[in-house]
């Protein structure tokens, strides 16, 4: 299998992962089925659309290849149907499912960070590390930001467990591995995506958060 097909498959995995996290958020906010489908799809393809707009790749990939939107819609529908019929069981094991969703969210973040760097390189900006890392980070967190805003809550990247920092670090690692040809593309993907996953999981387990100013009301 060629590396292009591998990257495409990875992007589909990320699409599924983010769609799942979007639907779960919709269920927590008691959205109806239409709202759940919209939120799941926006979470899955939103970051990529913003990425393509910045890179001048028009129309965005999400509209050029319907497979991404279709994958997000189908995933969202399946998750909603499962929750509809198994809602009581899910509620009893909410903490377990929350951890599962966190894993899916981390997978989606890591995958789209890699895709963001690849998109910047494909559009001719491979020599611009700042743009490549910026676009990669935005690709990874953009859908989640849209999800949180539509769900009426403060975006996770502004308050929770080094979310954006994990994306930036993973993008930097992957970009430098590719740019300086340190290793094969497949290994670079594994290291870059893996670093994002590891940071997110460690941040969750050890509850790492960036410093905040407290007691301003006193």
Image (cartoon, rainbow, N blue to C red):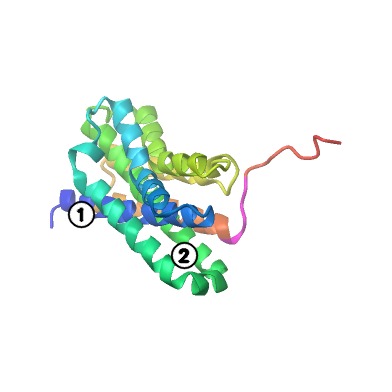
- Is residue 79 or residue 51 the one in the foreground? 79
Q: Residue furthest right?
A: 218
Q: Position of residue 74 (x, y in %)?
A: 28, 57
In the image, the segment drawn in magenta is 205-209
Mark 1 highlights which residue? 6
Q: Which residue occupies 54% across, 69% down?
A: 91
- Is residue 207 found inside the magenta-colored segment of the image? yes
Look at the picture and state if 56 lies above or below 159: above
- Is residue 91 or residue 210 the one in the foreground? 91
Q: Which residue occupies 47% across, 65% down?
A: 100
Task: Find numbered disc 2 in the image and state the secondary structure of the residue it sits on.
Answer: helix
Look at the picture and state if 136 lies above or below 9: above
- Is residue 177 found inside the magenta-colored segment of the image? no
Q: Which mark is residue 100?
A: 2
With 125 as the anchor, is 144 left or right in this view? right
The image quarter containing residue 52 is top left
- Is residue 184 or residue 53 the one in the foreground? 53
Disc 1 crowd, CA 10 A, few/some/many (<14, 14-19, 20+): few
| Magenta-colored segment: predominant secondary structure | loop
Q: Which residue occupies 55% across, 46% down?
A: 162
């Amino acid at each position: 299998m060629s590396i292009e097909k591998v990257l495409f498959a990875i992007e589909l995995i990320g699409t599924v992962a983010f769609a799942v996290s979007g639907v779960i958020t919709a269920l927590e906010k008691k959205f109806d089925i239409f709202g759940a489908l919209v939120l799941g799809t926006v979470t899955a393809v939103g970051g990529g659309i913003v990425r393509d707009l910045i890179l001048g790749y028009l129309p965005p990939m999400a509209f050029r290849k319907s497979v991404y939107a279709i994958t997000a819609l189908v995933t969202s529908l399946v998750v909603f149907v499962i929750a509809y019929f198994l809602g009581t069981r899910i509620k009893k094991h909410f903490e377990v499912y929350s951890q599962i969703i966190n894993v899916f969210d981390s997978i989606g973040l890591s995958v789209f960070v890699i895709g963001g760097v690849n998109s910047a390189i494909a559009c001719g900006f491979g020599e611009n590390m700042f743009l490549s890392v910026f676009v990669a980070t935005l690709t990874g967190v953009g859908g989640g930001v849209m999800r949180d805003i539509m769900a009426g809550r403060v975006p996770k990247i502004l308050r929770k467990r080094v979310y954006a920092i994990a994306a930036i670090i993973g993008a930097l690692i992957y970009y430098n591995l590719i740019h300086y040809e340190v290793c094969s593309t497949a290994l670079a993907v594994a290291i870059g995506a893996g670093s994002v996953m590891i940071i997110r999981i460690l941040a969750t387990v050890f509850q790492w958060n960036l410093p905040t100013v407290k007691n301003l009301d006193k």
